[in-house]
Image (cartoon, helix red, strand yellow):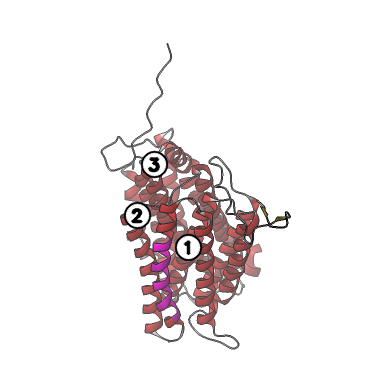
Amino acid sequence: MTSVGRDGERRRPAWPRPPAPAPAGRRVTPFEIFFDLVFVFALTRIMALIGPEATPTTMGQGLILLVLLWFAWSSYTWLGNHTRAEVGVVRGGFLVAMAALFVAALAMPEAWTPGPGLDGPLLVALAYVLLRAVHLALYHWAAAGVPRLRARIRFFAAVSAAGWVPLLLGALVAGAAHAVLWVLAFVIEIGGQRLSYARRGTWPLRSASHFTERHGLVLIIALGESVVAAGVGAASAVTALPVLGVALVGFAVTVCLWWLYFDRVAPAAAGVLAAATGDRRDRIAADAYSQTHLLLITAVIYLALGIEQVLAHVAGAHGGDGHAGAATLSWSASVALYGGAALYLGGRLLFLRLTGQSVPPAQPAVAVLTLLLLPLGVLLPPAAALAVLALLLLAAVAAERLRGGRPRQQPSGTGGVSPPARRGRRG
C-alpha cells in the first residue's frame, strides 16, 4: 500500500504491512521442509556430541540441547501456521533463523567443552537467542490486528528473555554449573509457555492440516536418521553376511516405529484435530503435537544411537572398524536402545490419549515390558538384544493390526477429546 505526499507523488511505506493470515486449509511448503532439514541436521550434530561411546553424561547433555532445539522448532511451526513463511519479510526472518540454527548445529559437538577458535558453548547460546528473538519479533509483527495474541506474545517474550539469562551465564562457566544453568533455561522457557497457556490461552491454530503434516514430516525425517545410523555403525563391514542381517533387523525396527504412528494413529489424530474447534483444538495442538512429539523425536534419536552401537559391535567382530573388544553393549547403549523404544511407545500412548483415541491394554504392556527388558542389552550379545527388541515391536504392530479399523475415539467425559458430532440425515 502506498501513501500520497504533499507533492502529489505516491510513496511506499517505510515498513511493509504485516502479511495476511495464512489460509486455513493450506499444506506445508518446500521452504518449510528446507527449514526442517536444517533442524534435523542439528539433531545429527547432537548424535555426534553423544559420540560412538555414549555415556550418561553425554546422553544427558544431548537431551538438554535437544529440548532447546525442539522448543525453537515448535515455535517456528506455530508461526508458520499463522502466516506464510515463504513470502516477504517473514521469509527473510526465517532465513536468518535458519542461519542461526545452522551455526548452532555446527557448534553442537563443542557445546559443553570449548575448543580452539570461537567459544563453543557461547556460540550455541548466542545462536539460540538469535533464533528465538527473530521468532518473537516476526510473530508479534505478523499478529498485527489481533491485540490479544500480541499481548500473549509480549508476555511470553518477557519470560523467554528471563530464560536467556541462565543460558548465557551457563555458557560462561564449566562443569555442573553449566548443566544446571542450561536446565534452568529450558525449565523457564517451558514453564513460561505453560503459564502463558493457563493465564492467556494457547496459541491460536489456523490450519489443522498444515500443523499435523508439519509434525509428521519432521518425525519421518528423524526416522530416516535411524536408517543412516545403521550405515554408520556397519561401516566397511556391511558386506559381511552377519552384519548385513543385523542391519536388516535394525531396519525392521525403524519400519515398526513408522507403522505404529503413521499407519493408523496419525490419520485418526489429524481427523480429531480438524474436527475440534476453539480452545479445545488449540489445546490438542499444543499438548499432543508441540509437547508429546518431543518424546517421539527424542526416542527416535536415542534408538538410532542404540542401533548404531549394535552394528558397530557386530561389524567389529567381523573385521570392521567397530568395537571388537566388547562382547556386549554398555549400559548407556542399552538405555539408548531399549529405553528409546520404551519412550517411543510411551509417547505414542500419550499421543493417543491426548487426541481422544482409545488405548488398548496390550500397548501399555508392551511399553512396560520393553523397559523391564533393558538389562538384556548388557547380558545378551548385541545382535540378540536387537532381535529381541525387534520381536517386541513386531508384536506391538501385530496387536495394532488385529484390532482392525481406525483407533476408536473415547466418548466425552473420559478425559479425552469427544468425537465430532454426526451429521444429521436429510429427509
Please tell me whether the stretch drawn in magenta is mainly helix, strand or loop. helix
Of callouts 3 and 2, which one flags the residue occurring earlier in the amino acid sequence? 2
Q: Nearer the viewer, residue 173 or 404?
A: 173
Q: How many numbered discs, if any?
A: 3
Amino acid marked by disc 1: Trp
Q: CA distance from mark 3 to mark 2?
A: 14 Å
Residue to which mark 1 is pinned: 70
- Considering only vertical position in the picture, is 32 above or below 243? above
**Residue 398 located within the stretch drawn in magenta:** no
Residue closest to the far top: 427
Residue bearing mark 2: 200
Range shown magenta: 154-168
Q: Is residue 87 visible?
A: yes
Q: Earlier in the sequence, mark 3 or mark 1?
A: 1
Which residue is denoted by mark 3 in the rendering? 278
> Considering depth in this image, is 139 or 229 the residue closer to the camera?
139
Identify the residue shown where x is 56% and y is 46%: 22
**Which residue occupies the extreme bottom position in the image?**
116
Residue type for callout 3: Gly
Q: Identity of the amino acid at label 2?
A: Arg
Q: Residue at x 56, y 67 (%)?
A: 42
Tell me residue 304's x, y (percent).
Answer: 51, 62
Q: Residues within 10 Å of mark 1 (few under 14, many from 20)?
A: some
Question: What is the spatial separation of the Cα atoms under label 2 and label 1, in whole angstroms?
Answer: 22 Å
Dot 3 surroundings within 10 Å: few (below 14), some, or many (20 or more)? few
Q: Which of 215 and 169 lies nearest the eye of the viewer?
A: 169
Question: Which secondary structure, mark 2?
Answer: helix
**Identity of the residue drawn at 36% across and 74% down:** 184
Q: Position of residue 263 (x, y in %)?
A: 50, 41
Mark linked to residue 225 = none
Residue 337 left/right relative to 323: left
Provide residue 258's location: percent of width, then percent of height: 51, 49
